[in-house]
Amino acid sequence: MVDSSFNGGFTLYIRYKIRTMKQLLSFVLLSAVFFTSFQACAQQEDKSKRPSPPAKVSQAISSGAMVTIDYSQPSLKGRTIGKDVEPMDGKVWRAGANEATVFEVNKDVKVEGKPLPAGKYALFMIANPDAWTIIFNKKWDTFGAFDYDKNKGQDALQVTVKPMTGGSPSEKLNYQIAKDGTVTLLWGDRKVAFHVS
């Protein structure tokens, strides 16, 4: 015969353990939710507070296409292009700062007379004294130009243009898109333009 006080005590012990386990499980789940929320907030940094803040320019050009350039805007801050800050001659450059510059067109267009399908592209450039290579790469969601070599096979188009100088230097990197489709990069004393039609 089992002592009823033992049976009652054992039941209370089991209830206590179950309640403790439920509290522990609730604490672990709540901690996991809090940690995940904290991580998500940390990842959504305010990009406008970066040293090279985001900028965007859009223009409906005369052919009817909408051209958009989404980029980050570095400042010279007394540095020399080609020595202290990109672009460096002969090296692939993200054509901005932080993430790769994104060039987007909503319709098929021609860039310097060569076809470029509608879509988003990473915009890279290679600066040289006599000519700049403008590269439109299908792998647009990337940071900088660090992975360009491995994604080089995804180039949709490359064109070559002549650089210009003159005018007043631009402290901040800036893109302009004219109604006639001329896209211009202004950075320090550098001026590079290509035509979209």
Image: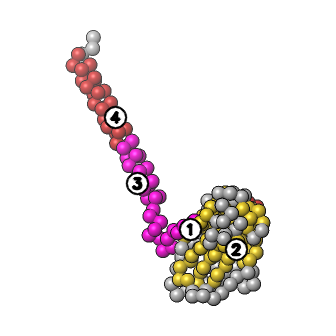
Please determine whether, in this image, residue 30 is positioned above or below residue 111: above
Q: Residue at x 46, y 58 (%)?
A: 44
- Disc nearer the start of the sequence (2/4): 4
Residue 36 falls within the magenta-colored stretch: yes
Question: Looking at the rendering, in which quadrant would you find the N terminus?
Answer: top left
Q: Which residue is mark 4?
A: 22
The Cα atoms of the two marked residues, 2 and 4, are separated by 65 Å
Q: CA distance from mark 2 to mark 1?
A: 15 Å
The region drawn magenta spans 29-58
Q: Which mark is residue 38?
A: 3
Give the vertical position of 20 relative to 150 (above or below). above
- How far across and how far down the image is residue 160, in percent? 76, 75
Residue drawn at 66 percent across, 65 percent down: 62
Please say if the residues under marks 2 and 4 sit with CB atoms less than 8 Å apart.
no
Work out whether residue 71 can be spotted.
yes
- Against 195, is 171 above or below? below
- The residue lying toward the viewer, choosing from 107 and 103, is 107
Q: Earlier in the sequence, mark 2 or mark 3?
A: 3
Place of residue 163 in the rendered image (x, y in percent of width and height, measured from the top left): 70, 82
**Secondary structure at numbered mark 3:** helix
Which kind of residue does numbered mark 1 sit on?
Answer: Val
Give left or right: position of 165 versus 8: right
Q: Residues within 10 Å of mark 3 (few under 14, many from 20)?
A: few
Front tag of 3 and 1: 1
Q: State the residue position of label 2.
A: 194
Q: Which residue is mark 1?
A: 57
Q: What residue type is disc 4 on?
A: Lys
Quarter of image, res 126: bottom right
Q: Earlier in the sequence, mark 2 or mark 1?
A: 1
